[in-house]
Each structure stands twice: as C-alpha cells, then as structure tokens.
Image: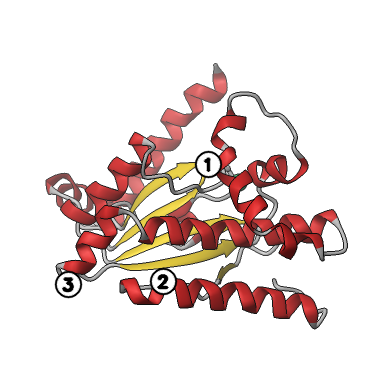
Amino acid sequence: MERFARLFSQNRHWATITQESDPEFFHGLSEEQHPDFLWIGCSDSRVPANQIVELAPGEVFVHRNIANVVDPDDLNCGAVIQYAIDHLKVEHVLVVGHYGCGGVKASLCNTSLGLADQWLERVDRVKEKHFECLRVLPDEKSQHDRLCELNVIEQVRNLCSTPVVQAAWARNQVVMVHGCIYGLEDGLIRDLGVSCRAPEEVEPHCAAAIAHLMEATGSGASSK
Ligand code: CO
C-alpha cells in the first residue's frame, strides 16, 4: 500500500515542478492535443515511450502491446491507428521494437506464456516467414535479436497495408511510417531504415532493410 501511496506524492511533486517551470503547461494541454507522433511499442516496462525520446506530455500518442504488434483487426490497435491518423493527423508513426523482448523470445523458443500465446501467433508468423534468415544464425541470442528486428519490419509492412494508412496516402495526407529498435543495454534507438511515405516505397524499403540485416550477418558484423 505504501508503494501505491507514494505514487500520489510523486505525482504532486511532478505537477508542482512542471507548473513552476511552465505556468501555462497544464492549461495549454487541457484544451486539446496535437502530437506529431504515434508510437507503437512493446508493453515492456523498460521501454517507456516519452522518456526515452525526451518527449513531453502532449507530444506522442501511444499504443503498446506485447511485442509491438500491428494488428488492424485488433479493435484496440486498429482504433488507435485510425484515431491518430484521421483525427490527430500525426505525421510520423513509429513501430518501436526492442532487443531482449520477452514476447519475441517466447515465440522463438515456443515457450507458453498463457493467454499471450494467442497474441504472439502474430510473431510466430514472422518467425515462420523468415525461418531461413534465422536458421543461419549461430546461436539463440543472435536469432532473438534478429527476430526482434524482423518483427519490427513486418509490423511496419502490416501498418502500411492498413486501409487507414492507404487512404491517408491516397488523399496526399503526410504520414511517414518508421521502424526502429531500442537497445536495453545502451538506451539507444536504432533506425531500421524502413521509413515509408507512399505505397510504392513499402515493399522496396522493407526488402532492402531485410537484405541489410542479412548482409550484416554474412560479414560477421553485429546488426546492433
Ligand atoms: Co517486448
């Protein structure tokens, strides 16, 4: 109970110092939000969206789920994407995976997590699609890292194929979709080079990003 109660004192402290540094901060945000970014990330407690890219409240609209999956048929995920693009008109949509993802590892190792197993079937499909890319890697750690990366790229592909993104592009609304991966060990986000802002960019950019990952494997260099 003490730890729960502490949240309120921490919140009062945060509200006080925020108000002191910018007396108009809460008033401005209470009117409406104009975030430039939609962040689709993993629910993992070690990857908090605002904090790791130093964005203040009001600057990023966030959807998180286990293993940063983009499934437009999931009502929650689909509604967030539609609201962010059609109503908030965010210009950048980021799919942000992370190395060391427990959901991705469960899929890789066929470990049961319970209810999440059904959710992770979406990552299983990425694993099966890229079985050959994973099979050539020497150990489970490299396969885990690679599946985290491939999962981001495939979720970018899923996102770009949604009717919401396709319709936005068809009406020339600026929507740039990006795929990134965060390192728990160094706190850095890496751009996977799959940024797309038009339908014709999706397949070539995703294919090039996957080829780039495979080249890094072939040369023995780390992809991180
Ligand atoms: Co994760």
Q: Residue at x 71, y 73 (%)?
A: 223
Label 2 vs label 1, nearer the camera: 2
* Dot 1 crowding, Cα within 10 Å, few <14, some 14–19, many 20+: some
Residue that mark 1 sits on: 43
Q: Amino acid at mark 1?
A: Ser
Is residue 71 or residue 30 the one in the foreground?
71
Residue that mark 2 sits on: 202
Residue 24 seen by the camera: no
Could you tell me residue 148's position as x and y percent? 64, 56
Q: Which quadrant holds the N terminus?
A: top right
SS for tag 2?
helix
Estimate the spatial distance between the alpha carbons at disc 2 and disc 1, rounded to whole Å: 26 Å
* Dot 2 crowding, Cα within 10 Å, few <14, some 14–19, many 20+: many
Q: Residue at x 20, y 57 (%)?
A: 34
Residue that mark 3 sits on: 172
Q: Residue at x 44, y 49 (%)?
A: 70
Estimate the spatial distance between the alpha carbons at disc 2 and disc 3, rounded to whole Å: 16 Å
As displayed, is residue 41 above or below residue 5? below
The residue at the far left in this view is 31
* Dot 3 crowding, Cα within 10 Å, few <14, some 14–19, many 20+: few
Could you tell me residue 38's position as x and y percent? 34, 56
Q: Amino acid at mark 3?
A: Asn
N-terminal of the two: label 1 or label 3? 1
SS for tag 1?
loop
User: Going by the image, does 98 lie left or right of 50?
Assistant: right
Q: Amino acid at mark 2?
A: Val
Estimate the spatial distance between the alpha carbons at disc 1 and disc 3, rounded to whole Å: 32 Å
